[in-house]
Image (cartoon, rainbow, N blue to C red):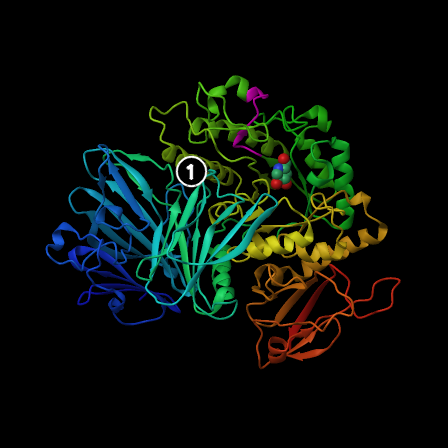
Amino acid sequence: MPVVYKKQDGTITIHTRNTSYQMKIGPLGLLLHTYYGPTINTDAGCSLVYRDRGFSPNPYDAGIDRTISADTLPLEYSCEAAGDYRAPALSINRKDGFMTGDMRYEGHQVVSGKYSLPGMPAVYADEAEAETLIVTLKEKNTGLKAVLKYGVLPELDVITRTAEIINGTSETVIISQAASAAVDIMTSADWDLIHFSGRHAGERTPYRTEIAQRETVISSRRGISSHHQNPFVILAEKETNEQYGQCIGMNLLWSGSFAANVSKDSYGSVHAVMGIQPDRFDYPLEPGESFIAPEIALTFSNEGLGRLSRNYHKLIAEHVCRGPWKNRRRPVLINNWEATEMNFTGEKIISIAKKAGELGVEMLVLDDGWFGKRDDDFAGLGDWYVNTNKLGCTMGELAEEVRKMGMKFGFWIEPEMVNEDSDLYREHPDWAFAAPDIDPIRDRYQLVLDFSREEVVDHVLDQICEVIDDCKADYIKMDMNRPLFDIYSRTAEYQSRGRLMYKYVLGVYRFMEKLLERYPDLLLEGCSGGGGRFDAGMLYYCPQIWCSDNTDAIDRVRIQYGTSFAYPIRTMGAHVSACPNYDTKRYVPIDTRAVVAMEGTFGYELDLNRLSEKEMKQVTAQIETFKKYWNILHCGLYYRLTDVMENRQEAAWMMVSEDGSEALLNIVTLDVTGNKPNRFIRCAGLDPDASYRDDETGMVYSGNLLMSTGLLMPMRAVEGHNLVTTPPEYDAFQIHFTKI
Ligand code: DGJ
């Protein structure tokens, strides 16, 4: 039984295969968190410390007992109004400004299967694979309720959480914080926070920082999850590394503004709260209305960060991504963006497609610039009709030409946006977010459409569906190239920023859901100026997301490394692009670019006509390699072998098939030095008692030695040079091992 209630000690314990999570109904009905860690079968209430701490207030009904304080006890869903001065999970004001929401345990139930969330992404599972725990908290004095839901996927060691706030009072209340979860770790050990931060073209760099007695906030206020901060954090014990130690992951399934607030409290406990961005979040909740916090997926690993990532990889690949493409090999695509930007004609696109088809590419994607008057950034967004003058044909005709070459066809859209120079904006200026009397903030010369309004979503969707119908698109790349700013809807009376931003994200989800309902076989790739909306919420709709606008293979090694902590390899859009690189101007050999792109969906983004004969042959061979290894690349268990942020000499990662019968080791050499000291790459995930054959050289290695001493870094002669002692810069190796 995954959920066990022990009436005698008031504990509710959730068990997964390797972990336990416990809460306890404490004094005055305060619901307290007691434990999250390796499996236990006891009351962990000993972690609760009842002491009279100065300046930590006591609930009125505690009477003269000064040891009961929400400020020092770990509330399962920490409520500001209960007297907790730490970062709250719940903060609500009455209309007169007075704080309310002192929640107490009312009851709980367990139901089979996993709950879903209306209009929002949520982990899904078969009835037999999951259980749901529903705990109801009720405000002490009023009819306000918080319904906490826990989805338990025992085999995956995953527990999901969400909270529904219900206004059962006769007054409007204003929610200023309703997080998805609070997690407390009662400990005297030192813990770190690992977060994934960056910028456009440099997303998701892992940073590790001590959790100290101060609040550290990882957050986005941009209306998208953002390039700058990812809605995923790890709490890790100081000693935890890839293979050893305790860590807890918090992965939010939300594509809008968010915040994770992590601190050590005055008495040494780690307190983490994560969910929707509370800054300027004023969400009016009318009597009878409810608010649902986005889902968060928690996992605990006692086997380091590698195991934590693999838990998420399985969860996201099998219980978040949906549709026919989730387990299918994705077509090797060619995208024209870096080759042409918006300066193309139909003829040019056909010439790119033709060469791609000859070399074995399986799908052409026509990027930005095919619609309206879109020849540059200034115009066209919002006018989703084909520019037949530019293409010289309709989209249907272009797709037909491409299909004759044996390839699938797809195209780019950016449905949430509008240029002022567009027919849509001229007709409906009030559909963009902007106050009527204030000039809006522009970004890439575009404004954001008010997707909180259903008629706006429907209009854009109808236009795009016409094009899809015409060309029977197999694939759509859905982009989003600016953050939200002027949060003002021309419909609402009261401009609640919190409500509008929340409804906006639901509008985006609605757009994608309707698109997929209408075209169930469509492969949807998410994008936001690269990886500005790479989050588990988007992956519910798009089984792959363009990882970054930075296609430089060496930068990508680092970006994909960071991304791999939370997200599976097969979700990361990655392409081989031209050299010198579009962004960094770096030169990296084409086979290395391919090895790096295979740590992702794999495709091309360049004009293949411009390659040398030799490189063209390499492209054909790369596509064959990808098809041969696809199963292990995308469905194998993923191991990070080097810390790419620390180790400047080489980057290595490997995939091991779930049945352990084969493994694929990938190595990219980074910095070079003359007469280089020996380097060994330590493998992981192998059977120590088995032997493995390198299928290219026939050499046989012991699994144990590959994981202890490691494999001596291979070296390859450079054309025209004798084999010396230093492997060339940016060389790459893919070594396939078969277990014998
Ligand atoms: C940003 C995307 O990340 C690029 O790949 C490309 O689609 C451009 N937008 C087009 O405007």
**Residue 23 in the image, given as x and y percentages of width and height:** 27, 61
Q: Quadrant of ligand 1?
A: top right
- Count of picture labels: 1
Write down the region rendered in magenta.
Answer: 414-424
In-image side of 290 versus 637 (left or right) = left
Say which of 237 and 111 sits in front.
237
Was residue 418 drawn as part of the magenta stretch in this picture? Answer: yes
Q: Residue 132: x percent and y percent? A: 32, 56
Q: In the rendered image of this protein, does residue 451 appear above or below residue 206?
A: above
Which amino acid does the dot numbered 1 rest on? Leu
Q: Is residue 585 covered in magenta?
A: no
Please identify the quadrant where the N terminus is shown: bottom left
Q: Position of residue 312 (x, y in %)?
A: 48, 58
Q: Disc 1, ligand 1: is the CB inside 8 Å?
A: no
The vertical placement of 255 against 376, above or below, is below
Q: Of helix, strand and loop, which mostly describes the magenta segment?
A: loop
Residue 247 vs 499, above or below: the answer is below
- Residue 499 location, x and y as percent? 36, 34
Farthest front residue in view: 54
Question: Relative to the observer, which residue lies in front, 290 or 533?
Answer: 533
User: Which residue: 48% across, 47% down?
Assistant: 540
Name the foreground residue: 230 vs 735: 230
Q: In the current view of this chain or complex, which residue is farthest to the bottom?
A: 689
Quarter of the figure with residue 154? bottom left
Judging by the rendered image, the residue that carries numbered circle 1 is: 506
Crowding near the residue tagged with mark 1, few <14, some 14–19, many ≥20 C-alpha atoms within 10 Å = many
x 50%, y 20%: residue: 429
In the image, taking residue 215 as reference, residue 43 lies left or right, namely left
- Asked which quadrant contains residue 717, the reply is bottom right
What residue appears at the point 69 percent right and 32 percent down from the top-left corner? 342
Q: Is residue 723 visible?
A: yes
Query: In what element is the residue under mark 1?
Result: helix
